[in-house]
């Protein structure tokens, strides 16, 4: 088989890139290791920046999102019994939306199916060959036999554990990593959200986050030990712990209920440079991971998609390879800023095992500066809603 672009990974990055290329008449095949149902069952991001919203519109997949989304003009931060809101709308005239990653992925899968674009699910043993030549190709195993796709370019959209990044030789690639000494335990429950805005809570017992998907679907997280297992946490234990980390008046309003999903995610900052090797381009979590505190992972993946889609469109439609040649540099400049914000909000809001009393005073002073200093609030707002492309 031959195509113009092989996209490895059918998560949000791969599907969005595929849909945008399809609309420009550029042929792409998506190779996904798992089944569609498996991909759609993953509960992850909930907050979308305007840049991603606009890209969904450009990809022609925004109809349901535009109907069902909730616009959030600000977000709350709490510490002990204090709580304040950072109002993006007042500070910088911008907002974010609540629309789950699961819904984004579903909309993209449906559009792909409707347009007849090719997605190969349950593709095992994907391998990228000759990416540093003008004739790359990708092999995979499906139903017990090996297949080969020749192409012009490969887009590595296969997440942190994928093969694409590892295809770049160690002599070329440099990885930067920071692993945080805790995880997030998250639950989804069919209960009304405790507050109209999200609450990011710093407490003596550790971080907590109150988020949502709609009027009757809430998403909550608590900072937990890396050694904790989901089975260690009953629903009752989760709700009790969450309440202890919120201001009393908020905790009193919290409606608890059975969890319909419960999972633990480790927290890590990670960047791999460069994001291009020959005719292979890395996109999204394949190249970088942020701790989820700033809601930047999916949104940063989307900015890579935008740069790569523009670069490939210019290559095919205008015979201009400038975008391709500058892709890695351009994408990384934005990635590092998202890394910094995510790292800074993680440091601001969590309890660390080796924090001294001095460290705690510094954290408190920084939160108070966000509470009372409009310049600090503006910095937070600009980063949270998403830096310009
Ligand atoms: P993935 O979603 O990892 O998709 C990669 C795909 O490639 C997968 O479908 C995988 O099965 C497939 N694949 C892997 N290996 C292979 C292979 N060898 N061959 C073929 N296919 C392969 N981000 C935000 O912006 N806002 C948030 O509010 C937010 N909250 C989060 C909360 C949690 C708890 C977590 C864990 C993450 C959160 N994120 C958030 C991050 C966000 O979910 C990720 O950044 C996003 O999923 C990245 O998309 P991706 O397509 O690049 O990678
Ligand atoms: C959600 C996740 C995040 O990491 C975040 O910062 C905000 C919201 C969520 O799942 O709703």
Image (cartoon, helix red, strand yellow):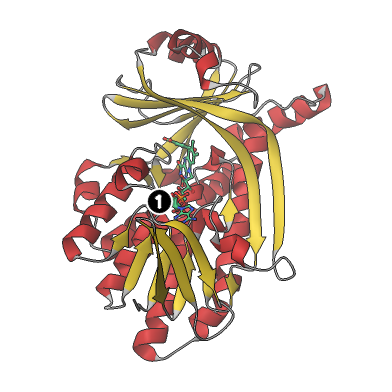
Q: Is residue 242 left or right of residue 117?
A: right
Estimate how packed mark 1 is, as few (under 14), some (14 to 19) or many (20 or more) residues with alpha carbons within 10 Å: few
In this view, the residue in front, 170 or 125, is 125
- Return the residue found at the far front: 144
Q: What element carries label 1?
A: loop
Residue identifier under label 1: 93
Estimate the x, y position of residue 310 in percent, counting from the top left. 41, 75
Estimate the x, y position of residue 281 in percent, counting from the top left. 52, 70
Mark 1 CB in 8 Å range of ligand 1? no
Residue positioned 71% across, 55% down in the render: 176
Estimate the x, y position of residue 1 in percent, counting from the top left. 34, 76
Estimate the x, y position of residue 21 in percent, counting from the top left. 32, 72
- Residue 347: tell me if it is visible: yes
Picture layout, residue 263 above or below residue 337: above
In this view, the residue in front, 193 or 121, is 121
Q: How many labels does the image show?
A: 1
- Residue 307: tell me if it is visible: no
Q: Is residue 221 left or right of residue 206?
A: left
Picture layout, residue 235 above or below residue 175: above
The part of the image, by quadrant, that contains residue 102 is top left
In this view, the residue in front, 315 or 336, is 315
Residue positioned 26% across, 78% down in the render: 25
- Return the residue found at the far left: 114
Residue positioned 50% across, 9% down in the render: 237
Residue positioned 42% across, 8% down in the render: 252
Picture layout, residue 290 above or below residue 206: below
């Amino acid at each position: 088989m031959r195509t113009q672009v092989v996209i490895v990974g059918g998560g949000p990055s791969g599907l969005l890139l595929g849909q945008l290329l399809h609309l420009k008449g550029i042929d792409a095949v998506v190779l996904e290791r798992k089944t569609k149902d498996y991909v759609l069952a993953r509960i992850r991001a909930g907050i979308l920046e305007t840049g991603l919203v606009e890209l969904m519109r450009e990809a022609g997949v925004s109809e349901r999102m535009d109907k069902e989304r909730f616009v959030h003009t600000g977000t709350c931060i709490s510490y002990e019994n204090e709580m304040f809101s950072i109002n993006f709308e007042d500070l910088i005239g911008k907002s974010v939306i609540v629309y789950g990653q699961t819904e984004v992925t579903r909309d993209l899968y449906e559009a792909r199916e409707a347009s007849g674009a090719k997605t190969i699910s349950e593709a095992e043993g994907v391998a990228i060959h000759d990416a540093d030549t003008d004739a790359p190709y990708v092999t995979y195993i499906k139903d017990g036999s090996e297949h080969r796709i020749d192409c012009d370019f490969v887009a590595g959209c296969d997440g942190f554990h994928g093969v694409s990044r590892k295809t770049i030789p160690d002599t070329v690639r440099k990885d930067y990593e920071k692993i945080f000494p805790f995880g997030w335990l998250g639950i989804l429950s069919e209960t009304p959200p405790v507050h109209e805005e999200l609450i990011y809570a710093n407490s003596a017992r550790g971080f907590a986050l109150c988020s949502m998907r709609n009027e009757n679907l809430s998403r909550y997280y608590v900072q937990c030990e890396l050694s904790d297992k989901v089975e260690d946490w009953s629903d009752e234990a989760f709700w009790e712990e969450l309440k202890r980390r919120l201001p009393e008046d908020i905790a009193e309003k919290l409606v608890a209920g059975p969890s319909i999903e419960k999972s633990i995610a480790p927290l890590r900052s990670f960047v791999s440079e460069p994001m291009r090797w020959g005719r292979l381009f890395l996109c999204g979590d394949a190249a970088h991971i942020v701790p989820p505190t700033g809601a930047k992972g999916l949104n940063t993946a989307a900015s890579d998609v935008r740069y790569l889609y523009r670069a490939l469109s210019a290559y095919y439609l205008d015979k201009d390879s400038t975008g391709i040649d500058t892709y890695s540099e351009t994408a990384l400049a934005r990635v590092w800023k998202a890394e910094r914000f995510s790292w800074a909000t993680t440091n601001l809001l969590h309890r660390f095992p080796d924090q001294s009393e001095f460290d705690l005073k510094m954290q408190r002073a920084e939160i108070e500066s966000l509470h009372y200093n409009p310049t600090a609030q503006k910095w937070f707002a600009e980063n949270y809603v998403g830096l310009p492309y």
